[in-house]
């Protein structure tokens, strides 16, 4: 498994709807509301051998209130 963090920017007033829609898809291990440039932060474990970009795109597809995502790959946990 490969761990990535994805920050999500939602249209104003839609953060809880987006969080509910993502929660129903059950692909993340943790999800938090945040303040600042992005509204949500997800910790995702991408299965070994999966294309990270395609995996992320497929999981977020069809949620129109998402304006932007920012994916941070991880390397070594300390």
Image (tube, rainbow, N blue to C red):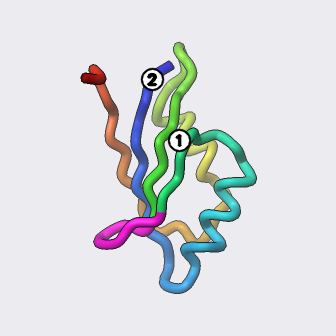
Which residue, given by chain and number where applicable, does mark 2 sit on?
A: 2
Q: Is residue 21 magenta?
A: no
Q: Is residue 36 magenta?
A: yes
Q: Quadrant of residue 2?
A: top left
Mark closest to the chain's N terminus, 1 or 2: 2
Q: Which residues are magenta?
A: 33-39
- The residue where tag 1 is placed is 56
Q: Secondary structure at mark 1?
A: helix
Q: Residue at x 58, y 41 (%)?
A: 28
Q: Position of residue 40 (x, y in %)?
A: 46, 62
Q: Which quadrant is home to the C terminus?
A: top left
Counting from the top left corner in percent of width and height, residue 57 is at 55, 44
Q: Secondary structure at mark 2?
A: strand
Looking at the image, is mark 1 or mark 2 nearer the viewer? 2
Q: Residues within 10 Å of mark 2 (few under 14, many from 20)?
A: some
Q: Residue furthest bottom?
A: 13
At 53% from the left and 14% from the top, the residue drawn is 49
**Residue located 50% across and 79% down the image:** 11
Give the dominant element type of the magenta stretch: helix, strand or loop.
Answer: loop
Local crowd size for mark 1, using a 10 Å CA cut-off: few (<14), some (14–19), many (≥20): some
Q: Which residue is more in the foreground, 61 or 29?
A: 29
């Amino acid at each position: 498994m490969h761990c990535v963090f994805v920050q999500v920017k939602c249209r104003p007033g839609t953060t809880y709807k987006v969080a509910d829609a993502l929660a129903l898809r059950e692909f993340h291990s943790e999800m938090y509301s945040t303040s600042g440039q992005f509204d949500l932060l997800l910790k995702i474990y991408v299965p070994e051998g999966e294309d990270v970009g395609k995996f992320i795109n497929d999981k977020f597809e069809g949620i129109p209130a998402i304006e932007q995502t920012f994916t941070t790959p991880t390397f070594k946990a300390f």
